Amino acid sequence: MKRVLKNTIIGLSMVSFASCNDWLMETSGDLLIPTSVLEFIPLLYNEGYPRTFANDLAWFVLMTDDVETGTLEKGPGQVSTDDNFDFIGGEGRHIFRWHVDIEERITDNFWAARYRNILGCNLIISRLPYMEFTEAQTGRFHHLAAQAYTLRALNYFWLINTYAVPWSPENLDMPGVIWVDSPEITRQPRPRSSIGFIYERIEEDLARAEYHMARAEVSTNRHLIGPAALMLLQTRVALFQEKWDDVIRVGEEFIRNFSAIRDLNNYPEENFGLNTTTPTRLFMFDLANNPEIIFTFGGNRAIFPFLSPSFTMATFGFRASRPLSQTHPHYPSPNVPLMSLFTESDLRRLAFFERDVITEEGRTYHYYLPMKFRSVSSGYAENWRTVEVFLNLAEAHARRATGVSTEAIDLLNRLRVNRIRTTDFAPLTPAHFPNRQTLINFIWDERRRELNFEEATRWWDLRRQGMLQLEHRLYTSTTDFEIYILPQGSNNWTLQIPRSELLHNNLIVGNPRDYIAPQ
């Protein structure tokens, strides 16, 4: 086993695992091979955790209905006349129109990064039977094991929801992704396992993680996977497989133990969305002050790389989608714009977005820039929060019920009372929902209001919610635009396996993609 591990560590260094250098210490010409659980703990953090995640998938948002490009209103019936602005040299426009070959203009690093993390997890998992630890360190051993299994499941969950068609009973035998559970570096070609097989392995890993987490000495460090993060992932995996009873079982236990929600009513509204460096401004991803954050990861990032960082560059750059007024020459907006989902009383409209304000001819226009993560001194750009479990649980209740679920409505109210201005808050009741589907649709909108620009949540939700038709307008001047339509169920709802894998693995089958011409 030592020789296998030595080869693995050498291989890790060859695939740019720079942080592994600490383990490649020369002693009389030999490599130092970790044996103690205390030596493996930092190795997992460096290699198993998705430290580059935020940048690996920054471009995913451009494929959704949360982002638009086009002219901005500056007065009644007027549009801005700034020069054409093509953010990041055209790569974004390539993604925005769901091009048949996205890697024509960008390199898809998401696949390779996830498998690097999986390899780090596999290294830890393979050594669990042989690790040395004292009786006092038993709890730390179990926490290490729980993290490794959770992280491997998580990375496979991300992969299967990006490079395979969405889960459904009919799709279980369709190609999924490559299953790798060995720490050995190999050039041996490998085929894709089925979607059903991958989900089975994910659930097995989560079950093992649950076993070890129950026996773990859990760190309070929210940069590490703990019981709350494990349960959130369990509800997410069950939700995507429509296992409503499992979502409810785990979700209810989660809320009994981790129910904190930050009440936006407790903060002055003038501190929301400020484009300043004042210490009084509020950020949702402020780890020190937001008790609903249970796990932070993904690396630091000040802005979305593909979104316009200010109004002056927003005319043709990408930005959060907002509704056009009826006086706008290009009314109506395609799809349902993200900003149209927020009422004036919804404090998330103010707290989640930075606003540049333009006032002309008596009209005020707000340009919105996502800013949940702008303060990441104590945390990272991606954060799991208790509110996702509230939403997962609400959807499970709503979709399991035959009528309008009062349990789902109660969960929504517990979230929204912390998000809607207190003077305007009115609890939802069954009378607000004519039928079961209207409640489900409301929950999906609430997910969009709450989880926008977090991970690739919107893209993954759109896929599992039926891959309905999307329309994007790609502006070529202040008055002209091309229309691109992603049809319902199009092959382009699934990303192509990256070239780096297709070129070196003759057993892998790529995904079909469609050419989408301008309308």
Image (cartoon, rainbow, N blue to C red):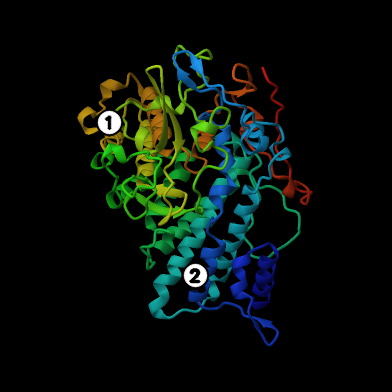
Q: Which mark is residue 397?
A: none
At label 2, the amino acid type is Ile
User: Answer yes or no: do the residues labelled 2 and 1 have beta carbons within 8 Å?
Assistant: no
Nearer to the camera, 427 or 321: 321
Residue 2 location, quadrant: bottom right
Instruction: Say whether residue 397 is left or right of residue 72.
Output: left
Residue sitting at x 47%, y 49%: 381
At label 1, the amino acid type is Thr
Instruction: Say whether residue 94 is left or right of residue 218.
Output: right
Residue under label 2: 41
Residue sitting at x 36%, y 63%: 220
Q: Position of residue 299 (x, y in %)?
A: 51, 54
Q: Residue furthest left?
A: 423
Nearer to the camera, 365 or 144: 365
Query: Is there any visible trace of residue 66 in the rendered image?
Result: yes
Compared with 262, 183 (above or below) is below
Q: CA distance from mark 2 to mark 1?
A: 44 Å
Whichever of callouts 2 and 1 sits on the residue coming sooner in the sequence is: 2
Residue under label 1: 406
Circle 2 — which element? Answer: helix
Instruction: Say whether residue 186 is left or right of residue 351.
Output: right
